[in-house]
Image: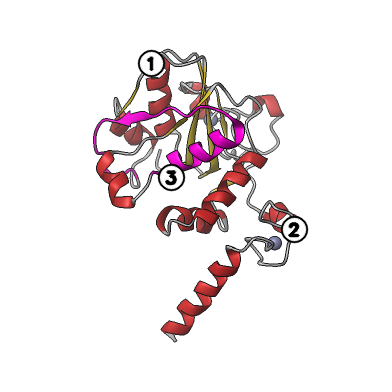
Amino acid sequence: MHLMHWMGKASHWFRRGLPGYCAFCLAADQSDRGWCNECYQMLPWNTEGCLQCKEPLKDRRLPYIQRICGHCLTNPPAFKATTAELLYQDPIIELIHDFKFNFSPRAGTLLVELMLANAPIALGDVLLPVPMFRSRARARGFNQAHWLANQLGQRLNLPVINAVCTRRLPSQRSLNRRQREENLLGAFQVQGPLPDHVTIVDDVVTTGATGQALAVAALSAGAKQIGIWAVARTPLDKSC
Ligand SMILES: [Zn+2]
Ligand SMILES: [Zn+2]
């Protein structure tokens, strides 16, 4: 039973990895994007997010320009806008896990294609991936944000610069936004001088605290405007 399960899973991922098939429903698809139209439309879109941090808003009737969440109104972030057009829900969770923990380049390529299909209006002068502390990157085998930024940089002909994570960060998983921000204080360093408009690249935005800490570091290295570009956004931690 166990063997059959894994054989089924392997065959699923093998077909998913083949060009000419939709990555989500595995139907034959002749476009080179990796998905069919039906599946693309059914993805969990984050259409009503805050314009600045992309947190999904509860009040969906707000006019476009008033779509700013309470947190961004009371504590304006160091970044101007976030582009994270999908919600961190299945099948995006599955795709990101496959990319991050199974090192699937096909899943990574699909994430890059999804990001390119939903890119910020202003791409900026340079891409800045969220760094990972050295020993953590070594343990995982790669830094997913760095991989995404390099692929996007090649496709868009944009330079990629690297920040340094100065210390090992305790897990952020159980922390609310305020605790995450404290946890990340001074954790990132960027070599300046940076060009005016910097776009931070990450796979998932959780509370925006990581983007905030890196944006502060980029501003102090000479940048004037920061945007964040990620595949997906999770709803805010209920405890904050
Ligand atoms: Zn499909
Ligand atoms: Zn916001």
First in residue order: circle 3 vs circle 1: 3
Q: Which of the 4 image quarters holds residue 38?
A: bottom right
Is disc 2 placed on a helix, strand or loop? Answer: helix
As measured in the structure, the alpha-carbon distance from the residue carrying label 2 to the one carrying label 3 is: 28 Å
Q: Dot 1: within a 10 Å radius of its alpha carbon, few (fewer than 14), some, or many (20 or more) residues?
A: some
Q: Nearer the viewer, residue 30 or 236?
A: 30
Residue position marked by numbered label 3 in the rendering: 144
Q: Give amino acid for label 2.
A: Glu
Q: Nearer the viewer, residue 101 or 41?
A: 101
First in residue order: circle 1 vs circle 2: 2
Q: Residue at x 68, y 51 (%)?
A: 33
As measured in the structure, the alpha-carbon distance from the residue carrying label 1 to the one carrying label 2 is: 45 Å
Q: Magenta residues?
A: 143-172
Q: Which of the 4 image quarters holds residue 134?
A: top left
Q: Nearer the viewer, residue 210 or 201?
A: 201
Q: Is residue 13 left or right of residue 47?
A: left
Residue position marked by numbered label 2 in the rendering: 38
Q: Give amino acid for label 1.
A: Gly
Asked if residue 237 can be seen in this view, the reply is no
Q: Position of residue 128 (x, y in %)?
A: 46, 29
Residue position marked by numbered label 1 in the rendering: 192
Q: Nearer the viewer, mark 1 or mark 2?
A: 1
Ligand 1 closer than 8 Å to the CB at disc 2?
Answer: yes
Q: Is residue 87 left or right of residue 38?
A: left
Are the residues tagged 2 and 3 within 8 Å (C-beta)? no
Q: Position of residue 238 (x, y in %)?
A: 44, 44
Magenta span contains residue 23: no
Q: Give amino acid for label 3.
A: Gln
Magenta span contains residue 148: yes
Q: Position of residue 171 (x, y in %)?
A: 30, 45
